[in-house]
Image (cartoon, rainbow, N blue to C red):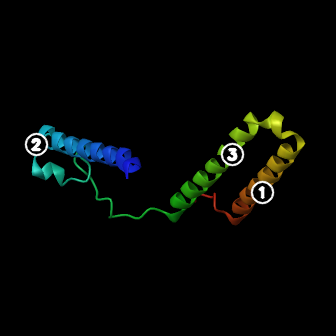
């Protein structure tokens, strides 16, 4: 049971810190007007339209997801470049296979017209 004592102490400190932070935020917050808090954007400018009045094209979300996918995939290039000397020919061949798969995916979405904005 004594091995769990540090975990209990850490949990208690975390809970106390969280409680203190929430209480401090409540005491120190700005008492703004209620009408301003109901606005979609609290930047001081009047909203000209509501966000739900018009729809965004699905292309926007598709391009955003494709960007995230290809961006995350390129993150794998950094560790490979750092360990390039240790990986030798095997690492080079593996990365070329990986990049070939990326290029095939890019050509596929290009041919499907997923990157066309219009």
Classed neighbour count for the residue bearing mark 1: other residues with Cα under 10 Å, few (<14), some (14–19), many (≥20): few
Task: Locate the C terminus and report the quarter of the image it occupies.
Answer: bottom right
- Residue 115 shown left or right of residue 46 in the figure: right
Q: Position of residue 25 (x, y in %)?
A: 18, 41
Circle 1 sits on which residue? 101
Local secondary structure at mark 1: helix
Q: Is residue 55 left or right of residue 110?
A: left
Circle 2 is placed at which residue position?
31
Relative depth, front residue between 66 and 49: 66
Q: Residue at x 15, y 49 (%)?
A: 36
- Mark 3: which secondary structure? loop
| Residue 44, visible in the rendered structure | no
Residue located farthest toward the right when viewing the structure as drawn: 89
User: If you read the primary sequence from the N terminus, does the residue marked by circle 2 or circle 3 appear first?
Assistant: 2
Q: Residues within 10 Å of mark 3 (few under 14, many from 20)?
A: few
Residue 46, x across and y down, in percent: 22, 48
- The answer to which of marks 2 and 1 sits earlier in the sequence is 2
N-terminal of the two: label 1 or label 3? 3
Q: Is residue 61 left or right of residue 81?
A: left
The residue to which callout 3 is attached is 76
Residue at 18% x, 55% y is 38
Q: Position of residue 48 (x, y in %)?
A: 26, 52
The reply to whether the C-beta atoms of the residues labelled 1 and 3 are less than 8 Å apart is no
The residue nearer to you, when weighing 89 against 40, is 89
Q: Quadrant of residue 107?
A: bottom right
Q: Which residue sits at x=75%, y=40%?
A: 80
Query: Alpha-carbon distance for marks 2 and 3?
Result: 47 Å
Query: Residue 83, relative to residue 108: is it above or below?
Result: above
């Amino acid at each position: 049971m004594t091995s769990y004592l540090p975990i209990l102490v850490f949990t208690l400190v975390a809970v106390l810190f969280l409680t203190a932070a929430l209480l401090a935020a409540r005491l120190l917050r700005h008492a703004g007007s209620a009408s301003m808090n109901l606005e979609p954007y609290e930047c001081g400018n009047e909203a000209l339209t509501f966000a739900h009045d018009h729809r965004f094209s699905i292309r926007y979300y598709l391009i955003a997801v494709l960007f995230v996918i290809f961006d995350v995939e390129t993150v794998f290039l950094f560790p490979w470049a750092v360990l390039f000397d240790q990986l030798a020919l095997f690492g080079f061949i593996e990365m070329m296979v990986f990049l070939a798969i990326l290029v095939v995916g890019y050509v596929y979405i290009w041919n499907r017209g997923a990157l066309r904005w219009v």
